[in-house]
Amino acid sequence: KLTSREFHPQDTVVDVDGVKIGDGSFVTMAGPCSVEGEEQIMEAARMAHAGGAKILRGGAYKPRTSPYAFQGLGETGLKIMRAAADAYELKVITEVMDEAHIDVVAEYADIIQIGARNMQNFRLLEAVGKTGKPIGLKRGISGTIEEWLNAAEYIAVQQNSNILFIERGIRTYERATRNTLDLSAVPLMKKLSHFPVIVDPSHGTGIWDLVSPMARAGVASGADGMIVEIHPDPLNAWSDGDQSLNEKNYLQMMKEVEVLVEAM
Ligand code: PEP
Ligand code: MN
């Protein structure tokens, strides 16, 4: 298989418009769960940059559990996120949920995110694969390692070898955390595949004060980077405020992560 270590023994380095992922460095993607407005995303970009993140995250098309919850700002959200990222020289990662939005998302984003709920949306995987853009492929909510690898294969067969695996926690019997961050998946995926692996300690825990310890655990597990939710005002965030770090806690986490990265 194209995604297997046997087929491609060397690590694949994914080049995100000059930001390299998988070259032994640890790359941070930070930003709000949802793009909420110009001021919010500009402030989040400033925070992300101040902490050393290279990539701004933020959702403009949101896969919400309830159809009555905020669904995202759509193209307006993409535009203002791109402007905020450019103001701080950050790259952009954002989710696409629907084939119909791939062109517009590809226009504004540097990495196209496939959300956990779409890990096995095979037509969507083929279509994003065709863009040739880097694809951040989240692990499905109940996705096995084998299913996750096969999902990546759907992208790779479209001649796209810019794939990032994102471990975002899986559903287990445990409800004290939102999901169970499967850290063993990091070294396992790196053994089975040649693509970089990113951890998401935000969705992996759902609880802001568990994010920094699990980010550090992610570094220790050998991840190539992390994606983390930050917000200028987490208490008033439109989505995922409980797992979002404010500026002070984000900067503290980044300091602690840096110490570990240096030690690795
Ligand atoms: C997100 O990144 O905000 C998100 C919806 O993540 P997931 O698809 O992992 O639930
Ligand atoms: Mn979120």
Image (cartoon, grey):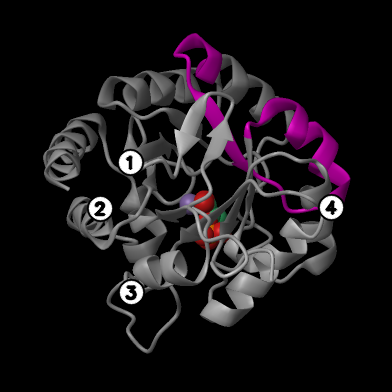
Based on the picture, tell me whether residue 87 belongs to the magenta stretch: yes
What is the x, y in percent for residue 229?
A: 39, 44
- Which residue position is annotated with label 3? 184
Which residue occupies 63% across, 31% down?
110
The quadrant of the rendering that contains the N terminus is bottom right
Q: Earlier in the sequence, mark 3 or mark 4?
A: 4
Q: Residues within 10 Å of mark 2 (few under 14, many from 20)?
A: many
Q: Check whether the beta carbons of the residues at disc 2 and disc 1 lie within 8 A of each other.
A: yes
Give the CA separation, mark 1 to mark 4.
29 Å
Q: Which amino acid does label 2 sit on?
A: Val
Magenta part of the protein: which range?
Answer: 84-110
- Which residue position is annotated with label 2? 219
Which residue occupies 42% across, 38% down?
29
Q: What residue type is labelled 3?
A: Ser
Work out whether 172 lies above or below 9: below
Residue 14 is marked as none
Determine the secondary structure under disc 3.
loop
What is the x, y in percent for residue 122?
A: 79, 68
Q: What residue type is labelled 1?
A: Phe
Residue 26 is marked as 1
Which residue occupies 46% across, 24% down?
40
How many numbered callouts?
4
Give the CA separation, mark 1 to mark 3.
18 Å
Residue 127 is marked as 4
